[in-house]
Image (cartoon, helix red, strand yellow):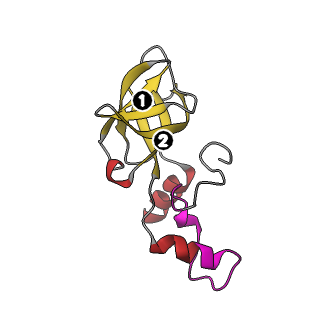
Amino acid sequence: MWGAEMNMDTTIVDAGLMSYVNMNKGDFVGRAAVQDLLKYRSRRHLVLVKIDSTDVDPHGDETVWLCGKVVGNVTSGCFSYHLGQSLAYVYLPPLLTVPGTQVQVEVLGELHSASVLAGPPVLTHTARAKLQKQD
């Protein structure tokens, strides 16, 4: 993730990685910094979007638009052969991260409709393990 979804200007809160931080663990390096981050609202969140495109796919650094204004940016993207659609990770303001929110992604100078997803469109290893424990 480093360099695309994460860099020196991105926090773990922005990137949605707080589920990997155990704040009940006791003291650890960076604990005070994480506590400070949690006091303030994040200005952007990382979400997955599906892009309506049949001929081009995002790869990163594309602009995300809504109502003629720039609202975010693509960090990485590709075509999912398993799903048969283009996917991209984008940073958006918190109000635009609701699943189903419609935005546009500019790929090679053309705007393509995109929809915010609720999460990964396929079960991850972790999600499969949790489901198996429930059985």
Furthest-top residue in this view: 55
Task: Please indicate whether residue 114 sits to the left or right of residue 7 in the image.
Answer: left
Above/below status of 111 relative to 70: above
Amino acid type, callout 2: Val
Can residue 121 be spotted in the picture? no
Above/below status of 104 relative to 108: below
Helix, strand or loop for disc 2: strand
x, y percentage for residue 83? 45, 29
Pointer 2: what residue? 90
Quarter of the image for the C terminus: give it.
bottom left
Task: Please indicate whether residue 78 sits to the left or right of residue 44 in the image.
Answer: right
Helix, strand or loop for disc 1: strand
Residues shaded magenta: 13-33
Q: Residues within 10 Å of mark 1 (few under 14, many from 20)?
A: many
Quote the CA–CA distance across marks 2 and 1: 9 Å
- Is residue 121 on the magenta stretch? no
Which mark identifies residue 79? none
x, y percentage for residue 85? 44, 26
Question: Based on the displayed image, in which of its 4 quarters is residue 115 positioned?
Answer: top left
Whichever of labels 2 and 1 marks the residue nearer the N terminus, that label is 2
Can residue 42 be spotted in the picture? yes
Looking at the image, which residue is at 51% across and 36% down? 74
x, y percentage for residue 118? 37, 48
Q: Are marks 2 and 1 in contact (CB under 8 Å)?
A: yes
Which mark identifies residue 105? 1
Looking at the image, which residue is at 54% across and 56% down? 126
